[in-house]
Image (tube, rainbow, N blue to C red):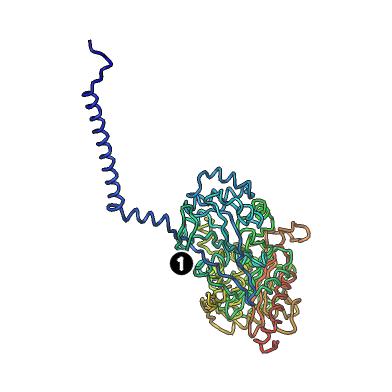
Amino acid sequence: MVDPTIKDRFFEQRLIGRRLLVAALFVVAALALVVVRVVDLQVTNHEHFSTLSEDNRVRVLPLPPTRGLIYDANGILLADNYPTHSLEIVLEKVGSLETTLAELSRIVTIEEGDQRRFERLRRQRRHYEGIPIRLNLTAQEMARFAVDAHRFPGVDIRAELVRYYPLGEHTAHVLGYVGRINETEWQQIDRSAYAGTHFIGKNGLEKAYERQLHGRVGHQQVEVNARGRVLRVLASEPPVPGQDLHLFLDIHLQRRAEAAIGDRRGALVAIEPRTGGVLALASTPSFDPNLFVQGISQADYNALIRSLDKPLFNRAVRGQYPPGSTIKSFVGLGGLNAGVTTFERAKWCPGHYSLPGHSHRFRDWKRTGHGSVAMERAIVESCDVYFYDLANQMGIDRLSASLIEFGFGMRTGIDVSGELPGLVPTRDWKRTTRRQPWYPGETLILGIGQGYFLATPLQLAVTTAAMATRGRFIEPRVVRALGDAAGALSAETGVVARQIEMAKPQDWEKVIRAMVNVVDGGRGTARHIRSGSYRIAGKTGTSQVFSLGQNQVYRADEIDERLKDHALFVAFAPVDDPLIAVAVIIENGGGGGSVAAPVAAEVIEAYLERPEVLARAGGRYDR
């Protein structure tokens, strides 16, 4: 029997040898893996990993450009930039976003609207781009965050320039406003051109001139540490600031126009006939565009969109109204040019008009009639019967073609976004849109600017300016010149769209003489605005909001205020050397001569009595 205490040394030596062999093989295999990995890192993929390493050390940061400023004709600043601070989060540097937001909310106020905006922008931005969680930090909030900033990797305060409109509601409908880029815009724009930029023009000049105002993004190559903090700048390409806009618009005249309209709903457009420069473009009521720049609150937005007065609606370029009798001068010119009438041909006005073979009466505004009237008196006293008859003689085809030639029913080409074209109805239009034939009675009411006929205040101002220049149509322009960073200006004058040639050029003078007598004549519908210093050529208009029955009588004091007629007036002055053309509409204002004409007269006087304008006229105006 073998003693169990005796050891088998031979067995133990073999066991130890096997273990050493296994250990040696494991060490060799591990060393082989290390060698393979070193070869992969240093030889095979050296360039790739070198680039990754460099990217961890070096970052390229976008440098947003400064948005161009906007000045009025007198050099008054209308759109400025001011510095503001926001709290931004870079998602790739944040551990738990939920925890970070919870901790941040204990230092700065983060409301529900801030979180909604953050979530919306989060879907648009890359993970290495900063996303604002709080805008417009106060000095106290910045100080509180600075104390605990080390606890929030990936969260930092960012300074940026934000748009500001010093004159607020006085420029809202002309300049428009900028706002934060939304998801739809983010899909459409060149993202590299907007790197580091959160704002884009939404409407008005801000949108129409977005490319010029925005500028070009610069870049900065920086070295960062492991926590993403910038250590030093390696290279830099500075941004190119946006161009400044210098306008024809005169803010003093703009405010004078708004004051003349008062608290009524309306619009006024004033144009310099020789250049097409827009001197005033007023739409009331208006709104404060600064509310929209960094995101309007739901309460403020609801108040604007629910207002019956529609302050967000740009009546000057988007308001489409029946132009009423303001177009009678153009209908008269169209009839003369078509050869269907003469300036001297008279028509008897008994206070109503009927088509041959029909009993329906189309009434004149003067129920007792005007008696025998030729074209001049028909324009001066705004005789409906005369123009019913002239429209009937011309027929719908010639009448609509003539109105289109004068610029109605099409966009003017103004450099403000959102313009609508109005409408000159035709046979084809009615057949296509209404699936109905054209009726002769519709031609009659088209001849006095009613029915389906729609025009914008801007169109009326442009066509009136063309009347002042005897048929020379110029695309209206709000922007006079563009300025670069060095202060150099490049002019942006209006383009001469076309010249209307009359078969008898003297017909221009005849119709303009009639428009002068609208103001100067003893029976003119705008005789109350006659000036002793210069002559005004004008035409009043009153457009119906609803139709009356055959035997109904319009009584303004018995109907709802918003169902009353619109008051319109168009004019230019001085007659022999036109310096300003104006179109006015006062919604539900009543008579054009008593309501709209005084508004236009106040603006014309304010402009023509200025020293610089008087100097251009030789120091006086000849009547």
Give the answer, above or below, for where 504 lies relative to 89: below
Q: Which residue is mark 1?
A: 236
At a point 58% along the width and 71% down the height, the residue shown is 393
Most distant residue in the right direction: 557
Give the answer, above or below, for where 113 lies relative to 279: above
| Quadrant of the image containing the N terminus | top left
- Amino acid type assigned to the residue bearing label 1 in the image: Ser
Most distant residue in the top direction: 1
| Quadrant of the image containing the C terminus | bottom right
Viewer-nearest residue: 370 or 89: 89
At a point 57% along the width and 59% down the height, the residue shown is 179
Locate residue 279 relative to residue 11 in the image: left or right: right
Whether residue 610 is visible, yes or no, is: yes
Locate residue 489 relative to residue 312 in the image: left or right: left
Q: Quadrant of residue 83?
A: bottom right
Percent position (x, y) of residue 95? Answer: 50, 45
Percent position (x, y) of residue 495? Answer: 52, 77
Viewer-nearest residue: 240 or 383: 240
Helix, strand or loop at mark 1: strand
Viewer-nearest residue: 198 or 536: 198
Instruction: Count numbered badges in the picture.
Output: 1
Whether residue 357 is visible, yes or no, is: no
Give the answer, above or below, for where 245 lies relative to 88: below
Percent position (x, y) of residue 608? Answer: 69, 81
Q: Residues within 10 Å of mark 1 (few under 14, many from 20)?
A: some
Percent position (x, y) of residue 241? Answer: 52, 70
